[in-house]
Image (cartoon, rainbow, N blue to C red):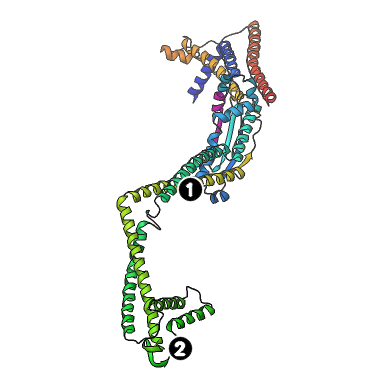
């Protein structure tokens, strides 16, 4: 312990003997260091905290998903550092007063970009901190406030420019698709009109041919039944007498039929009534047979014979009508078959035209639906915004620069100067071949030291030493005084800047 104490005493003594050199070096280092510190420009930092939360109620109703809302928040965060917004910041603050050309504007934007930071709060992803640094505290505050204003404008606008641009593009596409759709529809209608009845679908040739064949099958069945009925009625008519023998006549069958027809007309029957049609057919047959006079010299006409004649005429007329309809159907089927043989690619061409039309219609309907969805989303974003924007902490004017910390740097320079002076004096003490104590001399020489003689000073020497001590104390105090003046000047300058 005594050895360590002795070493300390020796080091202090070595420095004290060269105190003027140490003081000079301390002054030189401090003046140089304080000059360098004073030349470092001050940077003031202003910050604000904002909360950006996704809108979740109405956005989900129009199809804005949670991922899209988070993307909107990220875009808002990234857009604050874009060149367009930084240009608005430069022109909207006092920074733009010194900008007169495009080159100066680009330089101001480049200088501003690294001094702006937008960071998310690690504890709450909805909270962001906007920080700006500048050599003027007011400009730093104005930059942060301008960024907040830009963020609010972009949130309120709801990305109107992009929505409007998208809607214009969709309107142009819809107009083009509508014209193509109209042309395709006109082409399809013209093709259908030109080939009416020969195209697939309702009323096509194939459908009509199948219907005609089915109807002709029914007509064949009806013809068989009608012809059988005609044959049966013919047999009955052949075995039925025309008149009843021994019964007074009451007029000819033709007159009786005409009376029946007149009676039907009187009762309001129309010409299309089945009974009217039957009685007329009976009258025609009776007239063809010579007036329907009864055979055998005026016997009473047989009513059963007249009824059978009427039924036979009706069945014969039905056979004739069915035969005519069958002939017409056969001609129609033959005509359709001939057209299909002569135009085998008609159905394929119509299918291609219809497919083109359907493709265009599907595209048009999809574009129309997309346009309506984007228009609705644009209205939601414009009226309510996809995110909720709220300023938590407003930016303020900083009272002290964030960097450099001049008081600390000035103190460090002072300690560095004192250390440099003391270190230099201590090093020089070890370079010279003098021994501060007898023990050092004895250790270095290896010989015993008999004794040591202390320095004896006269009165004049003591006065001179006191005078020099006052000068040294004054020099050291002056160094500390300059340090104190620099600190006072620093705080005065901070107050003026604020």
In percent of the image, x 46 and y 82: which residue is there?
A: 255
Q: Is residue 360 visible?
A: no
Q: Is residue 377 above or below residue 2?
A: below
453 and 69: which is toward the camera = 69
Please provide percent x and percent y for residue 103: 56, 19
Quarter occupied by residue 102: top right
495 and 120: which is toward the camera = 120
Side of 145 relative to 278 (left or right): right
Q: Secondary structure at mark 1?
A: helix
Majority secondary structure of the magenta segment?
helix
Q: Secondary structure at mark 2?
A: loop
**Which contiguous range is marked in magenta?**
109-118
Q: CA distance from mark 2 to mark 1?
A: 83 Å
Mark with earlier residue (2, 1): 2
Residue furthest to the bottom: 246
Bin the neighbour count of mark 2 within 10 Å (Cα to Cα): few under 14, some 14-19, many 20 and up.
few
Q: Is residue 172 magenta?
A: no
Q: Is residue 305 above or below residue 189?
A: below
Where does label 1 land, which residue?
Answer: 365
Where does label 2 land, which residue?
Answer: 250
């Amino acid at each position: 312990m005594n050895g360590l104490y002795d070493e300390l005493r020796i080091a202090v003594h070595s420095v004290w003997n060269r105190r003027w050199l140490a003081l000079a070096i301390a002054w030189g280092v401090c003046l140089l260091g304080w000059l360098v510190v004073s030349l470092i420009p001050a940077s003031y930092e202003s910050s604000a905290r904002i909360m950006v939360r996704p809108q979740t109620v109405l956005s989900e109703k129009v199809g804005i998903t949670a991922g899209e809302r988070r993307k909107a928040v990220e875009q808002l965060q990234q857009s604050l550092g874009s060149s367009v917004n930084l240009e608005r910041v430069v022109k909207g603050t006092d920074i733009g007063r010194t900008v007169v050309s495009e080159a100066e504007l680009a330089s101001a934007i480049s200088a501003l970009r690294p001094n702006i930071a937008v960071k998310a709060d690690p504890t709450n992803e909805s909270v962001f901190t906007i920080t700006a640094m500048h050599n003027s505290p007011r400009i730093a505050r104005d930059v942060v406030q301008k960024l907040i204003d830009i963020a609010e404008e972009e949130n309120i606008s709801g990305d109107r420019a992009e929505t409007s641009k998208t809607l214009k593009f969709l309107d142009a596409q819809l107009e083009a698709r509508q014209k193509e759709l109209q042309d395709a529809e006109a082409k399809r209608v013209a093709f259908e009109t030109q080939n009416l009845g020969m195209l697939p679908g309702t009323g096509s040739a194939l459908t009509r041919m199948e219907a005609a064949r089915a109807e002709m099958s029914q007509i064949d069945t009806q013809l068989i039944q009608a012809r059988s009925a005609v044959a049966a009625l013919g047999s009955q008519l052949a075995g039925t007498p025309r008149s009843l023998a021994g019964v007074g006549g009451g007029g000819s069958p033709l007159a009786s039929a005409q009376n029946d027809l007149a009676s039907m007309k009187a009762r309001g029957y129309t010409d299309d009534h089945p009974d009217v049609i039957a009685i007329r057919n009976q009258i025609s047959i009776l007239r063809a047979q010579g007036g329907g006079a009864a055979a055998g010299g005026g016997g009473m006409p047989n009513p059963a014979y007249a009824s059978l004649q009427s039924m036979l005429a009706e069945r014969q007329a039905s056979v004739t009508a069915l035969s005519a309809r069958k002939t017409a159907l056969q001609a129609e089927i033959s005509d359709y078959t001939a057209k299909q043989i002569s135009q085998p690619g008609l159905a394929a061409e119509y299918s291609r035209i219809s497919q083109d039309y359907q493709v265009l219609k599907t595209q048009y309907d999809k574009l129309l639906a997309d346009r309506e969805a984007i228009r609705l989303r644009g209205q939601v974003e414009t009226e309510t915004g996809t995110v909720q924007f709220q300023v938590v902490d407003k930016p303020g004017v900083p009272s002290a620069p964030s960097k450099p910390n001049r008081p600390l740097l000035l103190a460090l320079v002072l300690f560095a100067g004192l250390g440099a002076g003391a270190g230099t004096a201590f090093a020089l003490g070890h370079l010279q071949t003098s021994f501060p104590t007898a023990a050092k001399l004895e250790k270095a020489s290896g010989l015993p030291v008999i004794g040591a003689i202390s320095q004896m000073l006269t009165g004049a020497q003591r006065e001179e030493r006191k005078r020099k001590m006052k000068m040294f104390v004054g020099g050291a105090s002056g160094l500390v005084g300059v340090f104190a003046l620099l600190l006072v000047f620093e705080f005065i300058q901070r107050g003026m800047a604020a």
